[in-house]
Image (cartoon, rainbow, N blue to C red):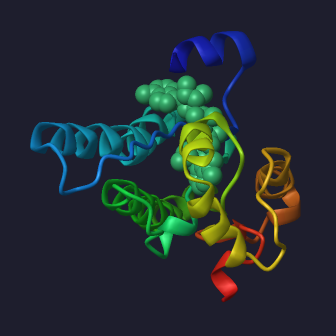
Amino acid sequence: MVSEVKEKLGVASILVNNAGINRRTPVTGDKATVVKDWDDILEVNIKGVFNVTHAFLSQLIESKGRVINIGSIQSFVHVAWPNSAAYTTSKHGVLGLTRSFAAELGSHGIRVNAIGPGLIETPLNKTARDANPGMVKQVLDHTPLGRAGKPIDIAGPAIFLASDLSAYVTGGIIMADGGFRTI
Ligand SMILES: NC(=O)c1ccc[n+]([C@@H]2O[C@H](COP(=O)([O-])OP(=O)(O)OC[C@H]3O[C@@H](n4cnc5c(N)ncnc54)[C@H](O)[C@@H]3O)[C@@H](O)[C@H]2O)c1
């Protein structure tokens, strides 16, 4: 994939590590399921960020590129929805990896930042939102802007971090959470 990108698009200069999964089995549930969910969530959400960034390193060094990782409010807090332990752990890890890569790759001219979305209406959480309006209300009652986010709400921060407008910004996280973390 990495060589195909170079062949078709040229040297990569912007990498967005967006892929992520979540599953909602309580940690007290069926052991085999809980363990598999733990492995799968960490594999995609944190090892995936490492793997893809590492695979693109030579291109990013060549382009003095920008990396944007998708964290979460769960990079900081645990949201009390079932089975958030693996997801919370993975998103805390995304923030740690963002800071570590920013520190290590800055001398190569690579900037590494994260975006921390709050509750955004996407397929990732559609089943949970539909099945648990009470849980959605719990999050929105805690959100000063009083609404869930849309995918477009992530686009502006991503464009900022991908552009030279953020030329002196690295190792940071821009929260796009309607103010969730302020209260
Ligand atoms: N929706 C939210 O409320 C919310 C909040 C905070 C953070 N996030 C994060 O935002 C990112 C995008 O999520 P979304 O809400 O758009 O969910 P989504 O399910 O709509 O999109 C996730 C994407 O990741 C891809 N993906 C999953 N596993 C993959 C793998 N192994 N290899 C390649 N691609 C894979 C899926 O195909 C899908 O296109 C995720 O990292 C998620 O954790 C979402």
Say whether residue 112 is visible: no
Assign ligand 1 to one image quadrant. top right
Q: Position of residue 173 (x, y in %)?
A: 64, 69
Q: Residue at x 29, y 37 (%)?
A: 40
Q: Nearer the viewer, residue 89 or 8?
A: 89
Q: Is residue 52 left or right of residue 159?
A: left
Residue at 63% x, 17% y is 5
- Whether residue 38 is visible to the viewer of this picture, yes or no, is yes
Q: Position of residue 28 (x, y in %)?
A: 18, 57
Camera-nearest residue between 32 and 90 = 32
The residue lying at 34 percent from left, 62 percent from top is: 89
Q: Quadrant of the C terminus?
A: bottom right
Left or right of 35 in this view: 54? right
Residue 131, picture quadrant: top right
User: Vertically, is 7 above or below 77?
Assistant: above
Find the residue positioned furthest to the bottom. Answer: 183
Residue 42 lies, with reference to residue 11, above or below; the image says below
Name the residue at 72% across, 67% down: 177
- In percent of width and height, residue 116 lies at 63, 63
- Residue 66 percent coordinates (x, y): 67, 49
Q: Nearer the viewer, residue 61 or 54?
A: 54
